[in-house]
Image (cartoon, grey):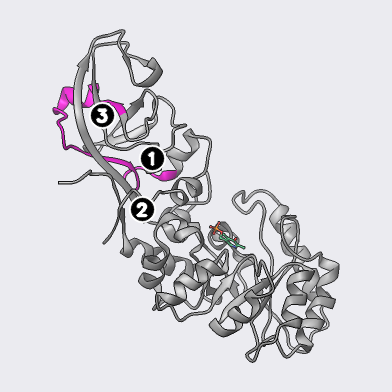
């Protein structure tokens, strides 16, 4: 036997979610975001599990792209932040890594590179996120300069990223789409570029943003980018289930406290189950009293502070119906409990909880 703490990664659910994204945008190609270790799901395993369906992958940096190539992934891989130094351009050309160009030094590095194969360029425009990208008025000149260079392959892609796509009633997204359309109208292009805007939220909820390339991440892992029900998001299937087991059970009297600093006090005689998971396993230390924990298929409240390797759960009501014993299964999030519910109680996003899953927790693929 070994420690029961692990994540189960459901490959069928992963493939279902990708196919759902593709069916929502039948005229777009779907680039799958696998940055940050595929949002904590294991980048190499995820990429290989989807490779018969995926035309290209997106990562944050060349280090991630190299790992994918070395593992045998043959598709193009977009570096979402482009190059961090000029020497990355020739590696990108050799290995068919596509480059986002979002500033002038990156553009110059491509023009000046001594490469024998042209590199694929995505030109990023800042339409309102104000994080990365050329100013709209600078896109036309940059596009023309890159178009004339032998170092740049046809066709270029013009891309932007939404700041508030998770809020479908916010018209910031419409304004970003309008700005983007204006940039394209202002281009004087001999070879028309391709276009890319949509992340998960807009794949699900903004068909007017679907273009040549969509770029979903979070939804592929089966979680909703919205904090409210949404028909298309409701079809997603959670990919990661974080599970553990009860490792100790005790009865305590009313008035006793549980865990470090006595942060929770029993109001009645209580049955407390100790579960082998803690913040050392990616379970958030900020989870408050009452956060749901699924024990034997039933939601029970977390009590006391989250320790590095353990949590405590009040199973009094469950135990009254069916004795809770050592070895009983526990789910922290996944099939029975959406990660977003845990995240919102911790004032964070499911994105963060999934992505920061540490290596101590084994990933089991099935
Ligand atoms: C991460 C990322 C995405 C994917 O966003 P999700 O909300 O996970 O779908 C899309 N585009 C860019 C540029 C990104 O960095």
For the residue carrying disc 1, how many other residues have a C-alpha within 10 Å: few (<14), some (14-19), or many (20+)?
some
Q: Nearer the viewer, residue 89 or 357?
A: 89
Q: Is residue 274 above or below residue 327?
A: above
Q: Position of residue 188 (x, y in %)?
A: 83, 83
Q: Position of residue 180 (x, y in %)?
A: 75, 67
Residue 334 colored in magenta in the image: yes
Q: Is residue 196 left or right of residue 49?
A: right
* Residue matched to label 3: 274
Going from N to C along the chain, the mark reached first, 2 or 1, is 2
* Residue matched to label 2: 240
Q: Is residue 303 left or right of residue 94?
A: left
Q: Is residue 299 among the parts visible in the rendering?
A: yes
* Residue matched to label 1: 280
Name the residue at 53% across, 79% down. Answer: 76
- Considering the numbered disc 1 on the image, is that residue within a helix, a strand or a loop? helix
Q: Nearer the viewer, residue 345 or 34?
A: 34
Going from N to C along the chain, the mark reached first, 3 or 2, is 2
Q: Nearer the viewer, residue 331 or 305?
A: 305
Residue interval drawn in magenta: 312-339
Q: Position of residue 214 (x, y in %)?
A: 57, 69
> Of tags 1 and 3, which is closer to the observer?
1
Quadrant for the C terminus in the image: bottom left
The quarter holding residue 92 reads: bottom right
> Of tags 2 and 1, which is closer to the observer?
1
Q: Is residue 279 above or below residue 91?
A: above
Gap between marks 2 and 1 measured at Cα: 17 Å
Name the residue at 76% across, 82% down. Answer: 111
- Considering the numbered disc 2 on the image, is that residue within a helix, a strand or a loop? strand
Gap between marks 1 and 3 measured at Cα: 15 Å
Gap between marks 3 and 2 measured at Cα: 22 Å
> Of tags 3 and 2, which is closer to the observer?
3
Q: Is residue 32 among the parts visible in the rendering?
A: no
């Amino acid at each position: 036997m070994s420690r029961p703490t692990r994540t189960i990664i459901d490959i069928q659910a992963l493939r279902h979610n990708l196919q759902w994204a593709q069916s929502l945008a039948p005229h777009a190609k779907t680039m799958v975001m696998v940055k940050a270790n595929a949002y904590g799901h294991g980048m190499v395993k995820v990429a290989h599990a989807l490779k018969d369906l995926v035309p290209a992958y997106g990562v944050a940096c060349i280090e991630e792209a190299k790992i994918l190539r070395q593992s045998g992934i043959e598709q193009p891989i977009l570096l979402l932040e482009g190059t961090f130094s000029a020497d990355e351009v020739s590696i990108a050309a050799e290995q068919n890594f596509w480059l986002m160009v979002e500033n002038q030094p990156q553009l110059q590095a491509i023009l000046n590179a001594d490469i024998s194969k042209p590199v694929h360029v995505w030109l990023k425009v800042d339409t309102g996120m104000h994080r990365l990208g050329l100013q709209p008025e600078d896109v036309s000149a940059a596009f023309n300069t890159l178009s004339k260079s032998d170092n740049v392959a046809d066709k270029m892609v013009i891309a932007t990223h939404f700041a508030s796509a998770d809020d479908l009633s916010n018209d910031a997204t419409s304004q970003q789409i309008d700005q983007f359309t204006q940039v394209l109208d202002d281009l004087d292009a001999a070879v028309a570029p391709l276009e890319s805007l949509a992340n998960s939220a807009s794949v699900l909820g903004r068909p007017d943003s679907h273009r040549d390339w969509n770029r979903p991440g979070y939804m592929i892992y089966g979680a909703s980018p919205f904090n409210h029900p949404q028909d298309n998001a409701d079809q997603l299937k959670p990919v990661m289930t974080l599970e553990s087991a009860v490792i100790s059970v005790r009865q305590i009297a009313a008035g006793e406290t549980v865990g470090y600093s006595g942060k929770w006090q029993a109001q009645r005689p209580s049955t407390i189950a100790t579960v082998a998971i803690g913040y050392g396993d990616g379970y958030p230390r900020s989870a408050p009293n009452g956060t749901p924990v699924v024990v034997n298929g039933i939601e029970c409240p977390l009590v006391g502070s989250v320790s590095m390797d353990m949590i405590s759960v009040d199973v009094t009501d469950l135990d009254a119906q069916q004795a809770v014993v050592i070895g009983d299964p526990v789910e922290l999030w996944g099939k029975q409990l959406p990660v977003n519910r845990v995240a919102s109680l911790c004032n964070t996003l499911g994105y963060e909880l999934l992505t920061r899953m540490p290596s101590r927790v084994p990933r089991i693929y099935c």
